Image (cartoon, grey):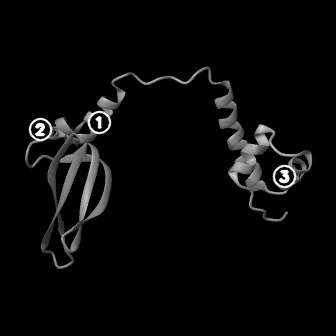
Amino acid sequence: MENINITDNQLLDYLDGVGTEVERKGLKEAITNSPLAQRRLKELETVHFFLQNKKGMEQPSKNFTDKVMEHLHAKASFTLVLSESGPDGREFTTLVPVEVVGRRAEAAGELEAGALVVCEGKIGKRKRSESWELIVTAFDAQPLRLPAPAPVD
């Protein structure tokens, strides 16, 4: 089996029946000899089948764009304080800005100072003057509710 580079466009043309009989026969042979092309062809066949059998695409509501844009611009910011002990036992504190964007931004803006928080999102870096800083961009931030301590007998 030789490793031949078969593009998605070639596979899609094959599914659509595009090309001469000789071209299609050569492509079929190349697909037969390439497990990677066979796997990709199966994936594209699934999408192809779905699109051919879709009875009209659904239309978004008239105010869809306005709703999306409204949620994109919502943002709440706070600073995450990370404290940890170094190898020498001294405590180090790192301050990481957090921006909660989207639908949950308003609720995140009501978090109490000092609350333990669980953030769902990603950590990244952004340029700040001449240096880079860590930042958490989250789509949700919820206060962590710890269970009440068990009574001591």
Which residue does the image show at 87% across and 51% down from the upper left? 23
Callout 1 amino acid: Met
Q: Does the image show residue 103? A: no
**CA neighbours of label 1 inside 10 A, class few (<14), some (14 to 19), many (20+):** few
Question: Residue 136 in the image: x percent, y percent?
Answer: 26, 55
Question: Residue 99 in the image: x percent, y percent?
Answer: 21, 50
Q: What's the CA distance linking mark 3 and mark 2?
A: 60 Å
- Which residue was labeled with disc 2? 110
Viewer-nearest residue: 4 or 65: 65
Q: Does the image show residue 78? A: yes
Which residue does the image show at 81% across and 39% down from the upper left? 17
Point out the tag, 1 or 3, that comes first from the N-terminus: 3
Viewer-nearest residue: 12 or 99: 12
Kindly state the secondary structure of the residue where label 3 is placed. helix
Q: Are marks 1 and 3 in contact (CB under 8 Å)?
A: no
Which residue does the image show at 14% across and 70% down from the upper left? 92
- Which residue was labeled with disc 1? 69
